[in-house]
Amino acid sequence: MKTYIKFLNNNLILLVFFLVNISIVEAHEFWIEPSEYFFENKKLEAHLKVGQEFQGMRLMYDPQRFKTFKILSGSKNKKIDVEGTLGDVPAINFKPDLKGLLIIYHETVDQLVDYKKFSKFKSFVTEKGYKKLINVHKEKKYPLENFIESYRRYAKSLVAYNGIEGKDKKTGLLFEFVLSNNPYSQLEDNLIEATLFYKKRPLKENLVTIFIKNEKDEIILKQVFTDDKGRFSFSIKPGQTYLLDSVIILPKKGNPSKKEPIWHSIWASTTFAVPKTYLEK
């Protein structure tokens, strides 16, 4: 009986792997979504999610699919690893030995997407602010079907855990947002300012998509370009949840006839929520 149960569990894991791989290829944004953004004296639970427009499927904890998974204190120079067991859902489910504003951050390994049709690539680069790459692709005489892109994701989430003291800061990720304001403190004019960093330097004139989820789970979408210092700002409202998303698409030296990637995209995301009433320090 034990052998039979083990057989079923192993096959279930394989099935989940298969479904996750299919979804990642077909989907867009990748983000960290806590079950709550304000925790007190209980386990911190958060999902890794992949999908579109702030809606998607939950991914399991799988060390083979990520390079970095940590939590950084926003008030102290201290960080801890996110540890788990293969198959854990939610991927984060423990009590961290930290408090205040916490920065959860995650880097995946490289993954691949196979573009069967050029129209999907055109839609992707247009949506992410890189429409110019359509002509670049043609000028390089790349194939118009069955070509490969590699991609890597960099995700952050800001949560308040037994307090709100602290601020967002650089984690060392290749590509990341850093908020200038603590969204769990009272903000002047309800305005958030953030900077987009690539290789630890501000990235100018890059498209940022802001997904806003209200209390009815309705999604509002806004887009803005970073300025010449990599900064941008947007207004917030109490009771709403936010997902910041940005992409860089780069050429990659690969042989398309050997099914090697010829494009590489990197993705940055950050999630946070604004409480209905601001929390006390």
Image (tube, helix red, strand yellow):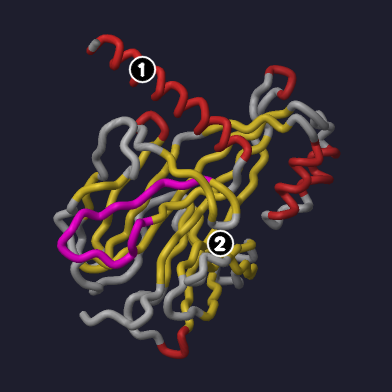
Relative height, residue 155 to residue 161 (above, below): above
Q: Earlier in the sequence, mark 1 or mark 2?
A: 1
Relative height, residue 204 to residue 47 (above, below): below
Is 61 left or right of 206, judged from the image as shown?
left
User: What residue sits 48% from the left and 53% below the top?
Assistant: 175
Mark number for residue 228?
none
The kind of secondary structure element at disc 1 is helix
Q: CA distance from mark 1 to mark 2?
A: 48 Å
User: What residue sits 22% from the left and 68% below the top?
Assistant: 100
**Callout 1, which amino acid?**
Leu
- Classify the position of the N terminus by image quarter: top left
Mark number for residue 8?
1
- Asked if the residues shown at circle 1 and circle 2 are in contact, with their CB atoms under 8 angstroms apart, the answer is no
Q: Position of residue 47 (x, y in %)?
A: 38, 48
Is 149 left or right of 180, judged from the image as shown?
right
Residue tagged 2:
203
The kind of secondary structure element at disc 2 is loop
Q: Is residue 40 magenta?
A: yes
Is 77 left or right of 268, judged from the image as shown?
left
| Circle 2 Cα neighbour tier, 10 Å, few/some/many (<14 / 14–19 / ≥20) | many
Q: Position of residue 143 (x, y in %)?
A: 81, 29
User: What residue sits 35% from the left and 85% below the top?
Assistant: 186
Residue segment shown in magenta: 34-50
